[in-house]
Image (cartoon, grey):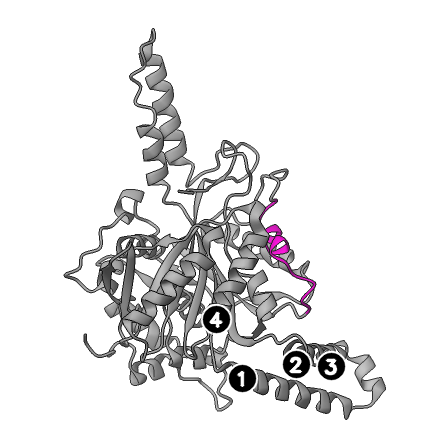
Amino acid sequence: MGKLFDLGLELLKTFLAPKDELKQTDGLSEKNLRAFLEHKGISDFLMYRYYEELENNMGLYHMADGRMGFIVRVFPTSMNAMGIEDSMYSLIDTLRKAGTVIHINTFASRNVNHLIRDFKHLHPCNANIDNVSILKEMIDDTYEFLKSGSNQSIVNGVDLRIRDFVSTISVLFPHDTTKDEIISVYNQLQGNLRKLYPINFSGSSLVSLTKEMLNPNKSMQEWEMIYDQHRVMNKQISSVGTSVKTIDGSGDFLVADEWQYRTLTTKQFPNEKTIVTSYDFYNLFFDRFGENIQIPIPCPFFTSLVIIVGDVELAREKAANKSRDDMRKVKKLKKDVIDEQPELSGRLKESKRNISLIEQEGQTPFDAMWSITMMENDEAKLKEYSSVIKDRFSTMKNWHIEEEKFGNISLFVFLYSLPLQHHKFVEDFIKRFDILFTSNTAAIAPLLGNISTNRMLIPYVDSHP
């Protein structure tokens, strides 16, 4: 396996160098990144190298820095929000080795080709009836209708497009982890995640998924790829014709010259355990009971929660000490000053709560990053969707998400939110990780499924096995 040249220290320094002496990540240089992307493309920033098929329907990914990991696809349903939360608690409790990186993702995919193929297969039109040609015409018309429904609304008066929610959980292990240890963890998680029906996410599945994200102008047939074990994986994902560019004066980046991608990151997480549940999280994206079929984000989107597992006891001690230090600083101020500035009293309450969570409830703090990237070829619509989802998040007390102001930050957050993608140097420079406790980590895991128990009406198709 080759050296990690494309993500070497000098390369990242070039792109992640701050413009001022304050070392602010908002000042990351874009000029050199834009030139690099134009001449070499995006593949050097994708760390996937090889996929190894193992026994018992398991696969192992080998990354550019020598680390290994696996990906499972899960099938959450809207009426099983507590099952999601319970599964996340089990996941976090199982993965305690310092240096482990967990990605929890959902991609609202336009690639419904396998689903409409299944429809055609289940309607062979060989019934022994009169005027079978009429039946065949009806089936063909429905097939074409479903095929077009991934790009245009299937209902008049609202923007409702067919999607396949692809939800995945990936685990990237530290360098000193053996293959046997990884297999043992995989088998254990199969049991812990049983409410979500986990299955292995193969190399072909990953190539197809990321191919769609980085080549949105291609057809569904072109997105579907078979992993070639004789070629490095990153080159299969980002091939000739893949174009990614940052945009002058914008926090967005451009893919395939006409698709604009906008990344929103968390500026402040919910800070009260009782405020957020998995049901609350689901309601941010759609009405679970199907009463309101207009969804806030009709375009494709990719949402992610990245969790970095540290030394548990050290993390608890560090977080508790920081909270005590914050309390001391605020308490030194005069009461009237605190009363005039709500953020100070909020900071004091949060510090007290954090200490309680650590010392009384035994919860573990993690470094975590939550983000969402929306993908649209109409800038006006993208602006509308961004405004709507921000408003919906604002209804969740103390959870604030904002658009990234610089395209290269937006791009790096997106790339390193993809399954298994992690690099310490990127993490340090984008500075988008914050402390999140076990309870809220479980509640805001971005695992999304169908929005109705009536499969005939769901706009997001649930490809449950």
**Identity, as a three-letter code, of the amino acid under mark 4:** Ile
Placement of 198 over or under 325, stated as above or below: above
Indicate the secondary structure of the residue bearing disc 3.
helix
Q: Position of residue 71 (x, y in %)?
A: 36, 60
**Identity, as a three-letter code, of the amino acid under mark 2:** Glu
Q: Position of residue 22 (x, y in %)?
A: 51, 89
Q: Nearer the viewer, mark 4 or mark 2?
A: 2
Residue 307 marker: 4
Q: Residues within 10 Å of mark 1 (few under 14, many from 20)?
A: few
Residue 14 included in the magenta stretch of the image: no
Stretch of the chain drawn in magenta: 272-287
Whether pointer 4 and pointer 2 mark residues with C-beta atoms closer than 8 Å, the reply is no
In three-dimensional space, the C-alpha distance between marks 3 and 2, rounded to whole angstroms, equals: 17 Å
Residue 348 marker: 3
Identify the residue at the far bottom of this view: 332
Identify the residue at the far left of this view: 230
Indicate the secondary structure of the residue bearing disc 2.
helix
Q: Is residue 36 left or right of residue 402?
A: left
Q: Is residue 24 left or right of residue 280?
A: left
Residue 277 included in the magenta stretch of the image: yes
Mark with earlier residue (3, 1): 1
Q: Nearer the viewer, mark 3 or mark 2?
A: 2
- Residue at the disc numbered 2: 359
- Residue at the disc numbered 1: 313
Q: Position of residue 389 (x, y in %)?
A: 59, 55
